[in-house]
Amino acid sequence: MIKKIFVKLKSEGIGGILQTVYNRLMPRQLGYYPNCKSVFQDGVGMEIGGPSGIFKQRGLIPVYPVAKKIDNVNFSHNTIWEGTISEGSSFIFNKGVTPGCQYIGEASNLEFIGDFSYDYVLSSHCIEHLANPLQGLSKWIRVLKQDGLLILVIPHKDGTFDHRRPVTSLGHLIQDFDNQIDESDMTHLDEILNLHDLAKDSGAGDFHSFQERSKQNKENRCLHQHVLDTRLAVETVDYMGLQILAVELFSPYHIAIIARKNSQDQGVSNEKYRGRDTTPCWLSPFPSDRMALQVN
């Protein structure tokens, strides 16, 4: 415990410690959560990556305590975050219910899952690790039923070790999608090595250790391949044709987006979240969101 406190103090300062204590005493929750709680209770979900504290009892979006069933996809039988993972009926998201099915496979593939299989898809702090986020999103949308929900939590650059890096452009994501970039891509390695803030990455070690780990990204998937702010997160979900239902921002680094897969004849309009006068960026706790609006 003392070691964890020291690491957090070193990476986030006394403010980070106080924020953690406050969050434990007064847990925050997504304002839109009551509107989608019934989907979690009655439907079947798929989580990409995880399990995540975001979806636990005291998390921002407490899905696990009420969910009927959640299956899971992870990229490897062994990861830095989860340790050893076994395929089969082994995904324990709530000890009070039957475990979900654990799949081992690429988040940007999902060839082992049929179309329209799930009522909702969960993903917390995963999409930034994908070399081809739009490819991943296209597969997550494919396995969603019509009117199914995507629950997406993305790290905002301002509160992470990415704060020195430029935000990825939507055009770059589209280019990666068109070029069918896969997980062996290392286009951003030099940028990451030059601009990654090791002081905010307690698990990275010294620069040499971080460099060696980064070179093995296909095996460990530790790199943030892409850097997001609120505007890019909204633009990305909008580009994929989803109806955005909510965008909520939480310090120190969470962007939470709830979006729905509409049928083709419903149409989609996300101007409420994309227009200059109503964008969540105006009320953002993240300085770069507000600065970007002033520039534009």
Image (tube, rainbow, N blue to C red):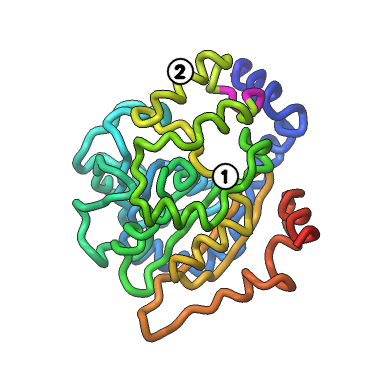
Look at 57% across and 62% down and name the residue there: 234
Residue 104: give x, y in percent of width and height: 25, 40
In this rendering, position of residue 63 left or right of residue 142: right
In this rendering, position of residue 108 left or right of residue 187: left
Residue 2: give x, y in percent of width and height: 63, 16
In this rendering, position of residue 253 left or right of residue 61: right
Residue denoted by label 2: 212
Q: In the image, is residue 241 part of the stretch drawn in magenta?
A: no
Residue 50: which quarter of the image?
Answer: top left
- What's drawn in magenta, residue-wise? 198-202
Instruction: Pick the residue in front: 94 or 125.
Output: 125
Look at 37% across and 48% down and name the residue there: 48
In this rendering, position of residue 23 left or right of residue 48: right
Instruction: Pick the residue in front: 52 or 254.
Output: 254
- Secondary structure state at the residue bearing disc 1: loop
Residue denoted by label 1: 227
Q: Amino acid at mark 1?
A: Val
210 versus 292 height, above or below: above
Marks 2 and 1, how far apart at CA: 21 Å
Q: Residue furthest bottom?
A: 265
